[in-house]
């Protein structure tokens, strides 16, 4: 009987749950509304009921549970320190609450960490020694693999790549500072940049304007489609996004000297519009040894979070 | 009989050698001109003769030799890949050459790595789990301690902190790019900035002008003295240097989440002129957990390189 773990990926809108084999194969899965306003105890109740049903009705034997939370996580205590998108959940001890309900061991970590771990173990087969992972969603997160292990740093806060400064005094970031990578490469920064460019260039962006009459509803996916169809505004927005991503990623290559820079999350579906400029930027660097080794890989997998959470639970025990 | 190692720190001008006990205590030391132009084989001859004399005349029994080289080092092969300040030495296999001559094991690493390792083991007593070290000299280097070990990355090139970009399109760096931390916080960047500010502000900087009639000979030490004596240009230069150092160091804290940020090298003697602004910048960050943990420490010790090289040799065997 292989060890099965359950992984839980908690976002601001949905919670994704999966029972995962050590290979990374998903055996059972579910998606629930996050219902953040109902509070963390109610969340633990609902998830525990789901796992209870998997145990009783499907005969699932689980060796552990892994939980990924969008925020600053104390992975030793298994508690959420601070999360702007999970209001009222700050300070809650998830590890203790889940262990009491499920009578199994529980690992809790940051959502970007678990997603990077999932992609490392499945897409990269756990092979490279050192990996820098960046998650491009509404915000920009990150995770570091050092010597094939998740590197958490001294307080579990390592890998906050999205808030490294790539332009001092630059665009406003959701964290309150200016010039963070997230302010340029997070979905909100990308869309803000697109709307500004459209405002400033009345005669341009025909494809984008025709396709998205209400620009308040613009999405990164639409920007990618418009860029594919030759829209110059859309292409300029991706070029700008990629330029800042390239600066941020190059800084990480200089510091971490990884084999792989892994780009995850919805925004990575922009594909070559971000990948090509990053690769060109890397190829032009004078530090040939580090940049010659670092391969950039887009690896969007919507299951990476829950699979990573489950595999991390397996790892930690 | 404790294990004694010899550490060798090779700079562009001098080579510093020391026989070091496992505690970090220096038992014997010497300083030789680097004589780079004579080539690496001649360098190996001279150092081997010195160590031979220490063995025969002083009865020194050595367990290993550690070598720190200012450049891109392949620490596995023990060879220098590339070093702009050690012309003609590129590609030389130091490990092989020294092992053949000295009949002992040899470790070779980057000079910033060995200096950070030396300061970690002696000044920090090897206690913190994760440390980011920055060496401020003519250039800016760095080294990372991860889980109390030196982190070398995938090609031995990790920790190139000086070439992370802190101002895209900014000042010219010796590496050929613009906006690297080194272009602001390396001695040449600091002095360039001082001369520019003096040029632009004819009525200011009286202390500095009186003390250094020939500004071509200005040194960081003179800038510190002038700042201590109230010179506004000197203070503005240190404020600017510290601002960029703070951006670069904050980026590293966000990524690495260390307990200590260690600042080494001659420029660190600017003391509070750089330390205070960095600490203020850290205190103002919204990421309280990581910045609350990270302590900034100035630790200039001119022996850190040779002591670190010796201790690293001890570590590697």
Image (spheres, coloured by chain):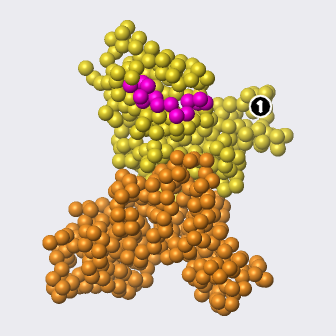
Chain colours: A orange, B yellow
Q: Which residue does the image show at 59% across and 43% down from the upper left?
A: B274
Q: Is residue A156 visible?
A: yes
**Figure check: A151 above or below A311:** above
Question: Farthest top residue?
Answer: B57
Q: Nearer the viewer, residue B13 or B208?
A: B13
Q: What residue is drawn where x is 25% and y is 72%?
A: A21
Horizontal arrangement in the rendering, residue B114 relative to residue A276 (left or right): left
Residue A17: horizontal and vertical position, in percent? 32, 80
Q: Nearer the viewer, residue B205 or B120?
A: B120
For this rendering, which residue is in front, B166 or B122? B166
The percent position of residue A290, horizontal first and vertical second, equals: 51, 49
Residue B203: x %, y % from top left: 84, 40
Disc 1 crowd, CA 10 A, few/some/many (<14, 14-19, 20+): some
To which chain does the residue with label 1 belong? B
Say which quarter of the image contains residue B214: top right
- Towards the viewer: A91 or A228: A228
> Residue at point 40% right, 66% down?
A116
User: What residue does disc 1 label?
Assistant: B215
Instruction: Name the quarter where the N terminus of chain B is drawn.
Output: top left
Provide the residue span drawn in magenta. Answer: B86-99
């Amino acid at each position: 009987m292989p060890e099965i773990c359950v992984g839980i990926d908690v976002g601001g809108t949905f919670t994704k749950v999966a029972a995962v084999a050590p290979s990374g194969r998903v055996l059972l899965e579910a998606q629930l509304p996050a219902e953040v306003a109902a509070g963390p105890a109610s969340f633990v109740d609902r998830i525990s009921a789901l796992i209870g049903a998997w145990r009783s009705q499907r005969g699932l034997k689980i060796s552990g549970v892994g939980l990924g939370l969008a925020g600053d996580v104390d992975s030793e205590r298994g508690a959420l320190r601070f999360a702007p998108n999970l209001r009222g959940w700050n300070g809650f001890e998830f590890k203790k609450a889940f262990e009491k309900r499920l009578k199994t061991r529980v690992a809790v970590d940051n959502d970007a960490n678990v997603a990077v771990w999932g992609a490392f173990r499945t897409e990269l087969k756990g092979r490279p020694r050192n990996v820098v992972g960046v998650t491009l969603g509404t915000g920009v997160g990150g995770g570091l693999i050092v010597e094939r292990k998740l590197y958490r740093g001294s307080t579990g806060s390592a890998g906050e790549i999205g808030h490294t400064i790539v332009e001092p005094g630059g665009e406003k970031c959701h964290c309150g500072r200016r010039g963070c990578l997230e302010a340029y490469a997070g979905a909100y920064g990308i869309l803000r940049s697109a709307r500004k460019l459209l405002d400033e260039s009345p005669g341009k962006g025909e494809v984008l304007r025709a396709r998205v009459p209400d620009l308040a509803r613009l999405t990164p996916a639409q920007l990618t489609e418009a860029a594919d169809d030759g829209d110059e505004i859309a292409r300029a927005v991706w070029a700008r996004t990629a330029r800042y991503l390239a600066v941020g990623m190059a800084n990480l290559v200089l510091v971490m000297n990884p084999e792989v820079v892994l780009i995850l999350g919805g925004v990575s579906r922009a594909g070559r519009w971000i990948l090509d400029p990053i690769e060109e930027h890397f190829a032009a660097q004078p530090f040939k040894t580090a940049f010659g080794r670092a391969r950039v890989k887009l690896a969007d997998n919507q299951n990476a979070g829950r699979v990573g959470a489950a595999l991390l639970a397996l790892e930690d025990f």
